[in-house]
Amino acid sequence: MLLNALASLGHRGIKTLRTFGRAGLMLFNAVVGKPEFRKHAPLLIRQLYNVGVLSMLIIIVSGVFIGMVLGLQGYLVLTTYSAETSLGMLVALSLLRELGPVVAALLFAGRAGSALTAEIGLMRATEQLSSLEMMAVDPLRRVVSPRFWAGVISLPLLTIIFVAVGIWGGSLVGVSWKGIDAGFFWSAMQNAVDWRLDLVNCLIKSVVFAITVTWIALFNGYDAIPTSAGISRATTRTVVHASLAVLGLDFVLTALMFGN
């Protein structure tokens, strides 16, 4: 009984290591090497539109509502201590340090990550990737690489948009609805936020999340079983694994940035 359990655990561990190895090799072969910007520029621009521009709607709408909820809840708490003029500080720091990069990455994983997995999984199922190999075209450089760089470029920009509209949503509730003086709101935010430190840390988080989410999405699609059920499971794995990875990495990065 115990030996069977240990054998099963060892088998799963080896399988996990093999998966990490295949994922690492896929990313290395797709990204590392002589760049061919002229040849792949149209592909990159197309993927920037598919991955980034088409994700803006959910990012903007979610950012506004999260900023409004944060402003309302923050106002209700701060009024208990007669500190409602600090609402701008609370909204800005919460969005820049945590909610902005994390929620934007989770939304990106659900919208763009799942789409990338399904698209590449369908290309695998319809043997489009095999056809590229038969024509001496590397599918990793042709298909995976433009999508990877599009994800890495898009998510930090989407995070900045999310934070900006979130702060605007918080000011909409605090200033326009609850009547906080606009000067107090914006001055408290400017005095509390170190734009160089907080903004740089926000961008660092978003870049790490972008690499992680895009990598997971592309590998799950590239490694998917070429059936409808296999693509469905791969898409589900992308959302689950990417979300867990973002939350885990967020704790690690927060501890490194603000733990001292």
Image (spheres, helix red, strand yellow):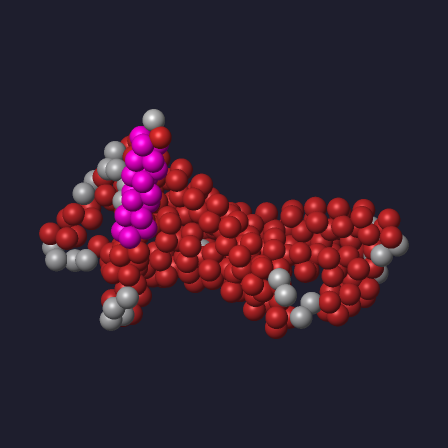
Magenta-drawn segment = 3-22
In the displayed structure image, the side of residue 94 where residue 39 appears, left or right:
left
What type of secondary structure mainly makes up the magenta span? helix
Q: Is residue 6 magenta?
A: yes
- Image location of residue 63, percent across then percent down: 61, 51
Residue 221, percent across and down?
31, 45
Q: Is residue 184 left or right of residue 197?
A: right
Q: Quadrant of the N terminus?
A: top left
Res 168 visible: no
Residue 101: image quadrant is: bottom right
Nearest the eye: 222 or 6: 6
Residue situated in front as seen by the camera: 248 or 30: 248
Q: Quadrant of the C terminus?
A: bottom right
Q: Is residue 109 left or right of residue 168?
A: left
Quick check: 183 left or right of 166? right
Q: Residue at x 56, y 63 (%)?
A: 256
Q: Nearer the viewer, residue 39 or 239?
A: 239
Position of residue 70 relative to residue 137, above or below, is above
Number of callouts in the render? 0
Q: Can residue 16 be found in the magenta stretch? A: yes
Q: Residue at x 67, y 70 (%)?
A: 194
Where residue 45 appears, as percent x and y from the top left, is 36, 61
Residue at 31% x, 32% y is 3
Taking the spot 68% from the left edge, 60% from the top edge, the residue there is: 92
